[in-house]
Image (tube, rainbow, N blue to C red):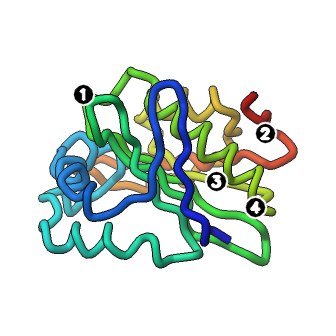
Amino acid sequence: MFANKPTLAGDRVTLVPVGPEHVEGLIELCDDPEVARLTGSHTHDGIAPKAALEWYSTRRDHEDRLDLAIMAPDGYVGEVVLNELDKDNLSCNLRIALVGARAFGKGYGTEAIRLVLDHAFATTPLHRIELGVYDFNDRAKHVYEKVGFVREGVQRDALLWEGQWYDSVTMSVLRTEWKPLS
């Protein structure tokens, strides 16, 4: 379903298929303690350069997922991914991660999500795209709602972080709800 790895251009960002040229950005992303907290990544001691290179070098080979680097005028600022494809039910998961403070609050994530959703609903038969977001991540929840995701439910005590439990909010957007970009 995701054999075509497009380049998608917006006003703030351009999404390009991830590749070896984005490894330094992935390492920066994985080394950021705040990104680890927001994504619930307990192994937040970063990613080895060799593992990052192997990961980004093989993403183009997978037809069941779409991994795109988010490029801003100053370079790599994160990634947006459609994964966990369920062909039978025409659904998948969306995940996004920005490199941290230098990328937050600039509209990069909002535009990246809109671009990838518009592409997915225009070029595939997908009906549903879902995600999970930790309840403490108000900035992300606001962005997801702004682009059209609807809150569906809560996974209670889904994340144990530094001795405290946090819920995960499940959200989705359906093809029938999506308002295409002009």
Rounded to the nearest angstrom, the CA distance separating label 2 from label 3 is 13 Å
Mark 3: few/some/many CA within 10 Å (<14, 14-19, 20+) = many
Kind of residue indicated by mark 3:
Glu
Kind of residue indicated by mark 1:
Arg
Name the residue at 65% across, 46% down: 117
Q: Which residue is mark 2?
A: 178
Vertical comparison of 36 with 127: above or below: above
Instruction: For the residues labelled 3 and 4, say whether their Cβ atoms are less than 8 Å apart.
Output: no
Q: Quadrant of residue 149?
A: top right
Q: Which residue is mark 1?
A: 102
Q: Which residue is mark 3?
A: 130
Nearest-to-viewer mark from 1 and 3: 1
Coordinates of residue 11 in the picture (x, y in percent)? 52, 25
Mark 2 / mark 3, whichever is N-terminal = 3
Vertical comparison of 146 with 63: above or below: above
Q: Is residue 24 left or right of residue 179?
A: left
Kind of residue indicated by mark 2:
Trp
SS state under label 4: loop
Rounded to the nearest angstrom, the CA distance separating label 3 from label 4 is 15 Å
Nearest-to-viewer mark from 2 and 3: 2
Mark 4: few/some/many CA within 10 Å (<14, 14-19, 20+) = few
Coordinates of residue 157 in the picture (x, y in percent)? 44, 53
Rounded to the nearest angstrom, the CA distance separating label 1 from label 3 is 27 Å
Name the residue at 15% across, 58% down: 46
Mark 1 / mark 4, whichever is N-terminal = 1
Q: Which residue is mark 4?
A: 124
Rounded to the nearest angstrom, the CA distance separating label 2 from label 4 is 13 Å
Q: Quadrant of residue 106?
A: top left
Q: Is residue 181 left or right of residue 141?
A: right
Mark 1 / mark 3, whichever is N-terminal = 1
